[in-house]
Image (cartoon, rainbow, N blue to C red):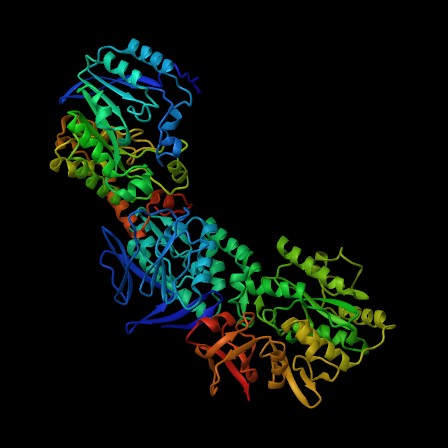
C-alpha cells in the first residue's frame, strides 16, 4: 500500500506498507552479505536477492547482458517486478506490481542519456502507484538528482564499493583518500537521503538537484539532458502553484515550471485587446511585483490620468521573460528569486528577446521602456521610447519623464472605460489559465469584472463565477463558474456516485482530465452533474492511478 | 604495417616448447591460410577475431605450396601443431589430399595436433588420421546457455563430448579448450563456470587448456570492451581455477594465455603480471601446484573486485567505471 505524503515534481516522499511493516521513501537500502532492514539486498556468492518485508526476489541471472544490449526483460515475483535493462518498446511492468527493481541500474551510471531515457520510460510504464528501486545507481552526489527523476528507493552498494576502493563519496563530489571509506560513505548516503526528503517535503527538490548537478560533468549532463528530453515527463508532475524558489544556476532557467510559463506566454497568452501602449518595467525582488516599493512608485507615475487603461504594464525578467501585470500573482511569477547583477546569460537574452517579439506581434501603438540598464537587451528590436534618466528608473526625473511620456503619447487615444479594462484583463487572465475558448465562454456579453486588482470578481448579472486572488495565485471558480468548464469537458474529474464529504480521495476517481495539474481548478462530476469544485492535489493521471491520497480539496459543493 | 597476404604462403610458422608424453620437447606451430572457419562465415563466435587469418579463395595448389614452405622451415621437431583458424577436418577448408600429404610429411613426428569443430569429427573422418594425432576441441563451456548466448558457438557441450569420446574410441589424444570469462559473466561466475567445465571435460580429455578471453580486433567483444562493458579476466582468476581444479582432475591442466599482461588480455595490476604468468606456464609443464605460490598486493584488490561485482550485479569493468572520473585527491 502506497501513500504519497509529499511531492516535488517527479520527486516524492512515500510511506509504503507491506506485510504490516512500513518503509518511508526516498530510502537507502543496505546491500551486503548480512544486510538487514525492512527493505534490503542480500549478497551471496550466487547473486543478490531483493528483500521487501520478508518477500524475496532474485536480482541476478547467470548471464548479465549490459544495459546497452537489446535483450532486457521484466520478471515478476509476486508483486515485485525485476527489470533488467535495456527497458525497450514492448517491455511492460505487469499489472499488480507494487515494487519495480532495476537490477542492473549500476550500468546507467556514467551514461546520462541512457539513464534519462530508461528511468523515464520505466516510470511512465509503471505509473505512480509503483515504488521504483534502483540499486547500484546512486551515490551521495547523485541521489537528489535520481530522486528528482523519479526513483524512490536507493541502496548503499555503490558508496560501499567506492569506499572500499578508498574513495570518499560526498554530496558535493568524490575524493580519493586512499583509505577505506565505507562507513563514511554509508553515513553520507543516509544524510543526503534525509536532505532529499526535507527538500521534497518543502516542494523544493529541484533546487537541491540544481545544487548537486555541478558535482561532476556527468551529473551536469544528466540534469541538462533530463531537462532537454523529458520536459513533458517533468511538466506533468509539476504543480501550477508552489513555494518560493530560486534560480541560481544556468540549468535552473530550464526548470519545468519556468519553461511551462514561457511556453504558455508564447503559445497561449494574448494581450487584452484594448491595450495600446506596451510599457516595459524592470522586475522587483519583492513578489508579487505590485507589492514592491519600486512598482508602487511606477504605479504612481502611470495611474495619474485616464490613459492608464490603455497602458499595458509588462515586466521584463529572467527566468520568466515577460510577465504582464495582470499575471503577477500567478505562480511562478509570484515565487521566483534570481540573482540580479545586470549581467545576463546568453540563454536569458535569447528567451527575453523571443518573448518580447511575441509581445510586439500583438500590435501596440507605442512601446515605452522604463527598464534602465536591461533596456539594452531589447532596445534594437523596435522603436522604443526610453523614459529612464541616468539609469535610475525610480529617480524623480525618471518617474516624471514616464508620467509625461505616457500623457503625451496617449493624448489622442480614446481613454478607456475601467469596466472594459477589467473585463479584457480578466479575459487575458482566463486565457492564460484555461485557454482562449474557456475565457471567451466565461467573459460573454453579460459578464463583467469588479474589484481592485488582484481581487477581481467575475460576475454574470448577480451571479459570481469566480475570483482572482493573490493568495490562490489564480482564478478560483464558484459552482456556476465550474459549470462552464464542465460543459466544455475541461478539468473534469469524474467520480462514482457517493456522498462526497470533505475532500475527494483518489480511490473514488473514475477518470480525470489528464491536463489537470496539481494546484489546478478541478471540477468534480458524477453522472454528468457538477457536484463540487476545488483544487487538484495531484495531476489527473495520478488521480486515476493512485488508490490512496487526496485527489481534490473541495472548495464548493452542491 | 600491412603485410601483403598471399594464399600460397602460410600465415605464420614458429617454434616453441610443449609437452610430448610428459616431457618438454621442441614443437613447431604452423598456421595455414585457408578459406576459413565455416562458422565464422555464419557470424562466428563473439570473441573470435581469427576470420582475419582466412582468405576467401584458397586452392588446393595454394595449400600445397603452403606445405612446401612449412617443410622448408621444419627442423624435425617431435611435436607439430597445425592451426587453420577453423577446422582441420572440414573438407572445404583442408581437402583430403592436403590432409593426407600433411600426415605423410609428419609421419615421423611423435605428436601432431590439430583443431576441429565437433561436427567434422566422425568415426569416418578419424579413421584417416594417424594415432599420433591429438584432436583439439573448443568446448569453451559446459553450460549450454553460456555456449549459445555468450560465446555464440553454434554447437552444444554434448556435441563436444560426443566428438571427444569418438576420438578416444579411435585411440587419439584429446585436448579440450575452455574459455575463462566469456561475455556477460562476472569474474566469479566465470571461475565457477570453468571449474564445472573442467569436470565435464575431464571424462574425455587428456589435456584441458584454459584460455582466458582476450580482446581481439573487430569482434563484438571488442565493441563492448571499448565502452567499458567488459574486462578481460584477472590472472588471479586463472590461478584460482588451476589450483582448485588440479587436485581433482585426471587430465593435464594447462594455460598459455594470448595477450597475457596487456589491457586486452588476462591481466593483474601490471607489476606482478609476468611473474604470475610465468608461474602458470611453469605449472602447465610440471603440473605442480607448488609453483603457483606467487603473491602480490593486488590479490586483495582482485578479491574486492569479485565482491564489488556481486554487490553491483554487473559484469562491466568496474575499475574503469570508477576511475574514469575526475575526483579530488584526498591523500
Which percent across, then down, holds residue A503?
48, 83
Nearer to us in this view, B234 or A76: A76
Can the viewer see residue A387?
Answer: no
The answer to which image quadrant residue A290 occupies is bottom right
User: Vertically, is A280 above or below A414?
Assistant: above
Nearer to us in this view, A170 or B149: B149
Which percent across, then down, holds residue A58?
28, 57
Residue shown at the point (48%, 68%) measured from the top left? A8
Residue shown at the point (23%, 56%) measured from the top left? A33
Position of the N terminus of chain B by quadrant:
top left
Which percent across, then down, holds residue B179?
27, 36
Residue reaching furthest to the right: A412
Which percent across, then down, holds residue B309?
30, 48
Residue shown at the point (37%, 37%) measured from the top left? B221
Residue reaching furthest to the top: B72
Residue shown at the point (37%, 58%) measured from the top left? A134
The answer to which image quadrant residue B146 occupies is top left
Query: From the viewer's perspective, is B111 left or right of A284?
Result: left
Nearer to us in this view, A437 or A374: A437
Residue reaching furthest to the bottom: A462
Amino acid at each position: 500500500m502506497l501513500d504519497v505524503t509529499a511531492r516535488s515534481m517527479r520527486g516524492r516522499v512515500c510511506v509504503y506498507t507491506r506485510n504490516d511493516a512500513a518503509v518511508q521513501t526516498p530510502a537507502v537500502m543496505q546491500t551486503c552479505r548480512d544486510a538487514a532492514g525492512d527493505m534490503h539486498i542480500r549478497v551471496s556468492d550466487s547473486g543478490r536477492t531483493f528483500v521487501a518485508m520478508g518477500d524475496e526476489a532474485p536480482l541476478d541471472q547467470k548471464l548479465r547482458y549490459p544495459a546497452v544490449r537489446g535483450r532486457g526483460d521484466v520478471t515478476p515475483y509476486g508483486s515485485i517486478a525485476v527489470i533488467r535493462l535495456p527497458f525497450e518498446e514492448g517491455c511492460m511492468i505487469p499489472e499488480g506490481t507494487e515494487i519495480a527493481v532495476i537490477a542492473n541500474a549500476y550500468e546507467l551510471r556514467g551514461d546520462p542519456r541512457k539513464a534519462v531515457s530508461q528511468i523515464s520510460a520505466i516510470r511512465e510504464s509503471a505509473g505512480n502507484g509503483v515504488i521504483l528501486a534502483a540499486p547500484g545507481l546512486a551515490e551521495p552526489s547523485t541521489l537528489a538528482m535520481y530522486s528528482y527523476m523519479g526513483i524512490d528507493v536507493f541502496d548503499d552498494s555503490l558508496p560501499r564499493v567506492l569506499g572500499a576502493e578508498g574513495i570518499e563519496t560526498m554530496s558535493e563530489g568524490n575524493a580519493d583518500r586512499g583509505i577505506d571509506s565505507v562507513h563514511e560513505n554509508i553515513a553520507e548516503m543516509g544524510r543526503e537521503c534525509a536532505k532529499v526528503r526535507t527538500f521534497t517535503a518543502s516542494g523544493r527538490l529541484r533546487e537541491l538537484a540544481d545544487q548537486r548537478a555541478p558535482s561532476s560533468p556527468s551529473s551536469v549532463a544528466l540534469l541538462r539532458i533530463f531537462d532537454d528530453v523529458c520536459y513533458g515527463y517533468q511538466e506533468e508532475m509539476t504543480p501550477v502553484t508552489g513555494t518560493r524558489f530560486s534560480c541560481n544556476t544556468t540549468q535552473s532557467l530550464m526548470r519545468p515550471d519556468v519553461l511551462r510559463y514561457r511556453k504558455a506566454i508564447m503559445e497561449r497568452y494574448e494581450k487584452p485587446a484594448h491595450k495600446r501602449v506596451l510599457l516595459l518595467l524592470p522586475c522587483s525582488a519583492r513578489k508579487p511585483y505590485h507589492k514592491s516599493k519600486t512598482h508602487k512608485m511606477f504605479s504612481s507615475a502611470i495611474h495619474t490620468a485616464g490613459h492608464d487603461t490603455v497602458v499595458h504594464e509588462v515586466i521584463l525578467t529572467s527566468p520568466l521573460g515577460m510577465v504582464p501585470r495582470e499575471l503577477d500573482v500567478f505562480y511562478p511569477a509570484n515565487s521566483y528569486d534570481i540573482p540580479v547583477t545586470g549581467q545576463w546569460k546568453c540563454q536569458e537574452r535569447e528567451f527575453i528577446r523571443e518573448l518580447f517579439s511575441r509581445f510586439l506581434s500583438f500590435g501596440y501603438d507605442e512601446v515605452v521602456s522604463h527598464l534602465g540598464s536591461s533596456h539594452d537587451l531589447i532596445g534594437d528590436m523596435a522603436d522604443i521610447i526610453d523614459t529612464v534618466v541616468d539609469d535610475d528608473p525610480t529617480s524623480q526625473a525618471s518617474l516624471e519623464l514616464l508620467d509625461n511620456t505616457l500623457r503625451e503619447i496617449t493624448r489622442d487615444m480614446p481613454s478607456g472605460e475601467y469596466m472594459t479594462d477589467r473585463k479584457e484583463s480578466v479575459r487575458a487572465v482566463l486565457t492564460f489559465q484555461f485557454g482562449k475558448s474557456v475565457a471567451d465562454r466565461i467573459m460573454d456579453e453579460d459578464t463583467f469584472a469588479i474589484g481592485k486588482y488582484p481581487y477581481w470578481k467575475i460576475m454574470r448579472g448577480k451571479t459570481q463565477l469566480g475570483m482572482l486572488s493573490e493568495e490562490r495565485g489564480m482564478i478560483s471558480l464558484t459552482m456556476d463558474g465550474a459549470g462552464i468548464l464542465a460543459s466544455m469537458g475541461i478539468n473534469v474529474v469524474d467520480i462514482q456516485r457517493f456522498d462526497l464529504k470533505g475532500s475527494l480521495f483518489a480511490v473514488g476517481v473514475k477518470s480525470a482530465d489528464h491536463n489537470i495539474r496539481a494546484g489546478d481548478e478541478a471540477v468534480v462530476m458524477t453522472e454528468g452533474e457538477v457536484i463540487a469544485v476545488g483544487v487538484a492535489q495531484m495531476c489527473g493521471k495520478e488521480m486515476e492511478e493512485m488508490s490512496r491520497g487526496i485527489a481534490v480539496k473541495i472548495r464548493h459543493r452542491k | 604495417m600491412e603485410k601483403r597476404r598471399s594464399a600460397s604462403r602460410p600465415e605464420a610458422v614458429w617454434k616453441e616448447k610443449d609437452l610430448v608424453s610428459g616431457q618438454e620437447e621442441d614443437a613447431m606451430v604452423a598456421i595455414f591460410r585457408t578459406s576459413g572457419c565455416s562458422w565464422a562465415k555464419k557470424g562466428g563466435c563473439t570473441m573470435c577475431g581469427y576470420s582475419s587469418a582466412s582468405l576467401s579463395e584458397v586452392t588446393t595448389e595454394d595449400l600445397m605450396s603452403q606445405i612446401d614452405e612449412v617443410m622448408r622451415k621444419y627442423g624435425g621437431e617431435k611435436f607439430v601443431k597445425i592451426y587453420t583458424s577453423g577446422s582441420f577436418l572440414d573438407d572445404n577448408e583442408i581437402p583430403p589430399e592436403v590432409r593426407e600429404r600433411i600426415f605423410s610429411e609428419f609421419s615421423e613426428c611423435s605428436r601432431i595436433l590439430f583443431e576441429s569443430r565437433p561436427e567434422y569429427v566422425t568415426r569416418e573422418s578419424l579413421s584417416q588420421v594417424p594415432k599420433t594425432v591429438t584432436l583439439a576441441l573448443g568446448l569453451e563451456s559446459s553450460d549450454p546457455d553460456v555456449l549459445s548466448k555468450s560465446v555464440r558457438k553454434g554447437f552444444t557441450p554434448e556435441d563436444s563430448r560426443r566428438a571427444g569420446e569418438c576420438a578416444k574410441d579411435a585411440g587419439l589424444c584429446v585436448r579440450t579448450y575452455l574459455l575463462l570469462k566469456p561475455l556477460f559473466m562476472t569474474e566469479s561466475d566465470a571461475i565457477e563456470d570453468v571449474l564445472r567445465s573442467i569436470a565435464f571435460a575431464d571424462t574425455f580429455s587428456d589435456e584441458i587448456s584454459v584460455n582466458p578471453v582476450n580482446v581481439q580486433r573487430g569482434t563484438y567483444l571488442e565493441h563492448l570492451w571499448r565502452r567499458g562493458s567488459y574486462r578481460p579476466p584477472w590472472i588471479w582468476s586463472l590461478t584460482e581455477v588451476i589450483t582448485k581444479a588440479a587436485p581433482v582432475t585426471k587430465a593435464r591442466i594447462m594455460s598459455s594465455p594470448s595477450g597475457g599482461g596487456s589491457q586486452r588480455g588476462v591481466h593483474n595490476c601490471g607489476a606482478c603480471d609476468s611473474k604470475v604468468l610465468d608461474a602458470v606456464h611453469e605449472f602447465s609443464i610440471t603440473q605442480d601446484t607448488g609453483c603457483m605460490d606467487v603473491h602480490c598486493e593486488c590479490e586483495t584488490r582482485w578479491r574486492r573486485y569479485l565482491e564489488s561485482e556481486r554487490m553491483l550485479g554487473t559484469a562491466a569493468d568496474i575499475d574503469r567505471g570508477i576511475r574514469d572520473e575526475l575526483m579530488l585527491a584526498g591523500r
